[in-house]
Image: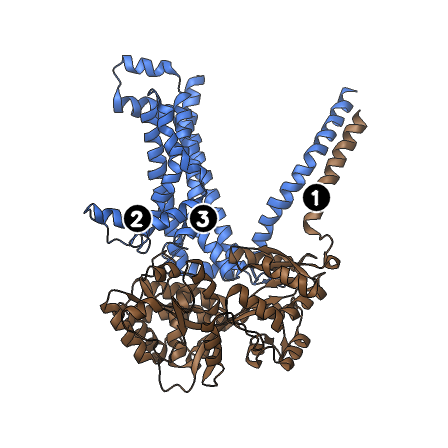
Amino acid sequence: MRPTRSAAAAAVLLLGAAALSGCSAGGSSGADSGELTFITDKTWDFDTFSAESKKDIDVSLATTAYADQEAFQAFVKQSFRTNKSPGLFTWHTGGQLEELVAEDLVAPTTDIWTKAVENGDVAESVRDLYTVDGEQYCTPISVDDWVMYYDKRTFEEYGLTAPTTWEEMMTVSDTLVDNGVTPFWNAGGNPWAFVWFQILAAGTDLDLYTGLTTGEVDWTDPEVVDVMNIWLDMKEKGYFTDPGSKVAAETQMKDQEVAMIPFGTWYASTLTTVGLESGTDWGVFPIPNVNPDQETTPVAIETAPACTAENSPQKDLGLEYAEWWMSSEAQTAWSEQEGNLPYNPNAEASTEEFQAIGAEFADPSYEFYLRWYEAAPAPILTASLDQFTGFMTNPGDPTPYLEGIQQVADEYWAGN
Amino acid sequence: MSRRSSTNYQRAAWGFLAPGVVAVVLVLHLPVLYTVFLSFTDFNGLGDPEFIGIDNYVRMFRDPAVLTSITNTLLWVVGTLVVPVGLGLVVAYLAFGLPGGAWLRVPFLVPYALSGVAVGVVFSFVLQNGGALSQALAFLNLPGSELRWLQDAPLNTFAMIIASAWQGVGVNALLFTVGLQSIPKEPLEAAKVDGAVGWRLFRFMIWPLLRPSTTIVVGLSIVNSLKTFDIVQSMTQGGPNRVSETLGVTMYRNTFLNSEYGLGAAVALFLTVITLAASIIYLRRQLTIGEPVKKAVRS
C-alpha cells in the first residue's frame, strides 16, 4: 500500500509539473488548418471579416479580443517570450512599433509593401508610418483620417453650412452657443484628452507639433503657450462640452446637445450604433487650419497595424493574411463592413460622405501627420493626457500644466 | 518499526504537499523575488532588464504625484475605517437581537456581490457633473448640485470612499454580527443587573468583548484600503491630473501605461512594505493589548 501511496504522490507531482510546463510551453500552432491566431484590442467585427478571408484565401481568423488596452499590451509583450506568440496581432505605429523592432520581435514586411505600393494599393506616405530604419514592419488594417463630424440636423435648423476656414468655424460656433447648442465635443482622461491640443497645435504650426514629438520643441515655448491660450479662449466662450461628462459623444450628438465631433473616419460605425445616418443626420468636413498662413492643411491620421511576431509558429500564415488585408478586395469588404474610408485607392468607400472626403484629401494641399496618441513617446503621452485633463477641468494659466509635461519630457529625452 | 512507519507517512505527506508547495513557490514567491529584482532595473517589458541600482526608488520619492498618491492612500485608510467599518458596526449593533434583524442586513449585503469596477462605473454616472446626484440635489433645492464630485480634490477621494463604503458596509456588518453572536450572555446580563444600559453597556461591555471581530474587520480594512485600485481606476483613473491617484493606481500607471516596469515594481514593493508594516504594527498592538487580560484570567 505504502509504495502505491508514494507512487500516487509522485504521480500528482508529475501531473502538477506537466500542467505548469503546459502553461509556459506552446502546443500546436494550428498553421496547417488555415486558422490564424489573431489577438486584438479593437472592438471591430473580425468574425464577419474572417468569413470573407476564408472565402478569398482560405484562411480564417481565430480572434481573441481584449477590452482593456493595458492588459492587451502586457499579454502581447509576454507572448514574445513563449512559442505562443500570435501569427497576427494589432498594435500601434510610432514609438510602440519602434520598441518591438528594436528587440527584433516583429517580422519585416518590406516585400509586401514594395509590391503593394507598386500596385497602387497604398500611398507612399502611409508606408512612412510603417518604416523603421529603412525597413517596413506590419501592414495596415485601416488608415483613418481625422475629420470633423457635424450634425446636419442642427446645422440645418440654424441655417449653417459646413465651414471651410477656422474663422468660419468660429462664427458657426458663436451661432450655436447663442442657440444653446455646444459647438464641440471634448473629453478629459485617457485617451481623448489630447484631441484639441492636437488640432490646435498642428493647425497653428505643424513643425511645432512635430517638434514636440521629437523633443526639439519645449513645452514651455511661447508658441505652445499661445496654442493653449487659444484652447482657453474657446473654452471660456463655451465652445466645449463638459470634460467630466460620462455621456458618450455620439449620444450627445444624437440628442443634439453637441454639434461637432473631431474623430477619425472609424467613428462612422459608432454613429450608426445610435441610429444616426451618414448623409442625412451627419456629414464630415476637413478640420481647417487655425493659422491661415500655413501652406498646407494638416490632417491627422491614425492607423491600425496588423503585425506578425518574428518567432510565431504561424509567421508565414500571418504574413499571407497581412498581405491580403491590403488588397482592394479586402479593403472594399472592410469598408462595407465598418463604414470607414479605405486607404487603398483601388477600393471603394461605402458612403458618399467618405467618397467625397477621400477625393478632397487626394488634393496636395492636405498634409498628413501622425496623431498624438501614436506620435508621442509613452511617458510624455501619459503626462500630457494628465495635464490636458487638469487644464480642461480647471482652465486658467496654462504654464503650470505645460511645465508638468516639460518635466517628464526632460527626463525622457535625457535617457533617449 | 513505528519510527519507520512515521517516516513513510511523512514522505507520503510531503509527496501530497509537494505539488501545492511547488505551485505556491512558482506563482507567488518567485514573482515577488522577480518584482524585487525588476525594481532595481530599467525595463520596458521587452528585451532584457538593465540594472540601474536604486534609481527607481529615487525617482519615485522625487515625484510629487507619488506624494499625493501616498496622501490619498492614507485618506483611504482613515476613510475606510470611519465609514464602512463604523457604519458596519452601527448596522450590526442596531439590527442585532431585533426580530427580523437578518432581513435588515440583507440590503447592505447585496452590493458586496458586485465587483469594484461595476460599483465604480455605476457611481461615476451618479457622481459625474450634472449626473444623477447633482440633478437630484437641484430638484430638491438642496445645496451641492454645483459640486464637481469627481473632479475636485480631495472631494473626489471622499466621494469614492463613500462609493466603496456602499459596497463594503454589508460584509463588515456581517462580521460584526458574528462577533456579537459569539459574546457570552452571562457577563452582559450581569452588567445589566448592575445598571449598565445603552451607551455604557456598549462602551464598557460589548466593545471590549467584540475585540476579536474588531481586530479582523479593522485589519482587513487597513490592508484592503492600502491596496485600493479598482474603484479609483474605474471612476477617475486617478485624475484629473493625478490628484486622486492611490499607490495601486500609481503602480499600474507606471507599469502598464508608461511601460516603466522597474518604476512600477518599485512602487509595488513600497506598497507591500507599507501594507506589511501596517498589518504587523496593528496586529502586534492588538495582541499586546490582549495579553494582560489573558494573564489575569490565568492567574
Type of amino acid under label 2: Ala
Circle count: 3
Type of amino acid under label 1: Ala
The residue at the point 33 percent across, 16 percent down is: B188
Tell me the residue that label 3 is attached to: B230
Q: Is residue B179 above or below residue B143?
A: above
Q: Is residue B107 above or below residue A266?
A: above
In percent of width and height, residue B208 lies at: 36, 25
Residue B132 image label:
2
Query: Which numbered disc, 1 or 2, marks the residue closer to the eye?
Result: 2
The residue at the point 44 percent across, 52 percent down is: B247
The residue at the point 42 percent across, 27 percent down is: B212
Of A305 and B227, nearer the camera is A305
Residue A138, visible in the rendered structure: no
**In the displayed structure image, the side of residue A67 where residue A306 appears, left or right:** right
Q: Is residue B236 above or below residue A147?
A: above
Of B118 and A280, nearer the camera is A280
Residue A19 image label:
1
Say which quarter of the image contains residue B218.
top left
Q: Is residue A363 above or below residue A337?
A: below
In primary-sequence order, the first of circles 2 and 3 is 2
Helix, strand or loop at label 3? It is helix
